[in-house]
Amino acid sequence: MVTCLKKIFNHYFKRRNSYFHRKLILDDLTGIWNSEKFIHETENIIKKSSKEYILVFIDIDNFKYINGSYGYEFGNLVLVDLADKINKQLEYCGYFCRYGADRFLILLEKSIAGRFACNIQDIPEYIVHYEMDHMKYIKIPLKFGICPINDSNRNEPVQKLIDCANIAMRSIKGMHNQCAAYYSEELKKQRRMEIDIIHRMDYALANGEFCVFLQPKYSIHTEKIVGAEALVRWIHPVEGSLSPALFIPIFEKNGFIVHLDFFVYEEVLRYMQNCIRERRRIFPIALNVSRTHVDNNDFVERLISLVDRYQVPHEMIELEVTESAFSAETSALLNMIEKLKKAKFLISIDDFGTGYSSLNLLKDVPVDILKIAREFLIQTEESEASRIIIEEVVHMAKRLNIHTICEGVENKTQVEFLCNIGCDMAQGYYYSKPMPLQDFQSKYQMDGSDCNK
Ligand code: C2E
Ligand code: CA
């Protein structure tokens, strides 16, 4: 009897211990290793061996949209499925874990990483589409940050190596044409600069380091100015003029773009109000609208109230929404554009031809102007196919009553090509570089100016 009870207790404690053991090392949702177990094992593996490894940081781009649009339950399904797919890809030759939320880590020997690197490119393909109700397909894009591990860094704490892989991954977040990046010294420098920018941004805005430039837009046929685009400049006391390409993506990530954009809008509106008061000639001015604004429910109301405070007619304001903004879940964006359109602002799709979106977009979005990307224009110099595509885009836009403008126009040949295919407007160094507001006023808005080039 006693032996029998002992057996039952032993069995019970074994099961209980194994339950607690599993809880300690496994992730509740996916059943794969949790981060503590992974870090512990990685520490043992890389420090005891002289082999080279790679540490891969995986993250789902825009996972919050998946959760937000389809619900947490569906989000969880995606995570479980992804864990399963990574498992199958690795075929037992690497270690991996869920690193919280929508992030996963993989440790692989470098000698077999080549094979996995090929597979890595395939993973996004595998999970690109989830069938919903046999009708809808959802894109689940993945980003991979890779930190090589060798004698130079194997004694670093594993957490630091994970941070490096994370930096590599973050360097390509939001870029739709790149899914993997390696950590490097260059990236480390970039990261340092990113941190410096973040530390200084509030001070810079409060102390007048940001200013607005205007770049004119010309009618291709009359060769006269028809409008302008507002472009922000950061005049850094040490670094000089910083390119927006450097700081805008950082501000889009951390949300500061909302403050910066409204600063730009207010500068432009104050300038336009003065021009109106001084009875100068005014042109529509285009403002860039970051994708980040879509998540702020009060964006449209805030913009309208600002424009009205400066008594600028809504039709004199054009809002440029970048085409890549349409790559993610679009219903909130469409809703925002409809409200802006109803308020009589002009709407243009910026960088047309560089993003994911299809021509189908034009059917759903009430746009006034298509702004053809510089990259697209450059391709026309080499490729007959690109020339045909741009020409057809311009024709189609015309039939849909949408005006067309091409950006980044730098030479006469490009102007002639655009003129021949019937493009309405152009913007670029051929006509003028962006310039400070005062210079713009002197050049284009003095009394009696014929506003020619
Ligand atoms: P974008 O909206 O596509 O603006 C056009 C960019 O092309 C500007 O760069 C402009 O200076 C440059 N550009 C104009 N003509 C030419 C040309 O002929 N050749 C070449 N190579 N480049 C030309 P910039 O000012 O550096 O701005 C870069 C991007 O930063 C802009 O691209 C826009 O997406 C963003 N950005 C700039 N200002 C703002 C802003 O106030 N708010 C927001 N949200 N984004 C802004
Ligand atoms: Ca623009």
Image (cartoon, rainbow, N blue to C red):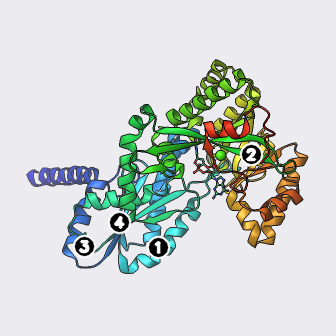
The span from disc 4 to disc 2 (Cα, nearest Å) is 40 Å
For label 1, the residue is: 117
| Nearest-to-viewer mark from 1 and 2 | 2
Which is more toward the observer, 191 or 177?
191
Q: Earlier in the sequence, mark 3 or mark 4?
A: 3
**The disc label shown at residue 152, or none:** 3
For label 3, count other residues whose C-alpha is less than 10 Å away and answer few (under 14), some (14-19) or many (20+): few
Q: Quadrant of residue 439?
A: top right
**The disc label shown at residue 217, or none:** 2
The span from disc 1 to disc 2 (Cα, nearest Å) is 45 Å
Is disc 1 in contact with disc 4, using a CB cutoff of under 8 Å?
no
Q: Is residue 331 visible?
A: no
For label 2, count other residues whose C-alpha is less than 10 Å away and answer few (under 14), some (14-19) or many (20+): many
Q: Earlier in the sequence, mark 3 or mark 1?
A: 1
- Look at the picture and state if 305 lies above or below 198: above
Residue in view at x 39 percent, y 61 percent = 187
Which is more toward the observer, 239 or 103?
239
| Nearest-to-viewer mark from 1 and 4 | 4
> Where does the image place residue 444, in percent across and percent down from the top left?
73, 39
| Nearest-to-viewer mark from 3 and 1 | 3
Q: Is residue 423 visible?
A: yes
Q: Amino acid at mark 3?
A: Ser
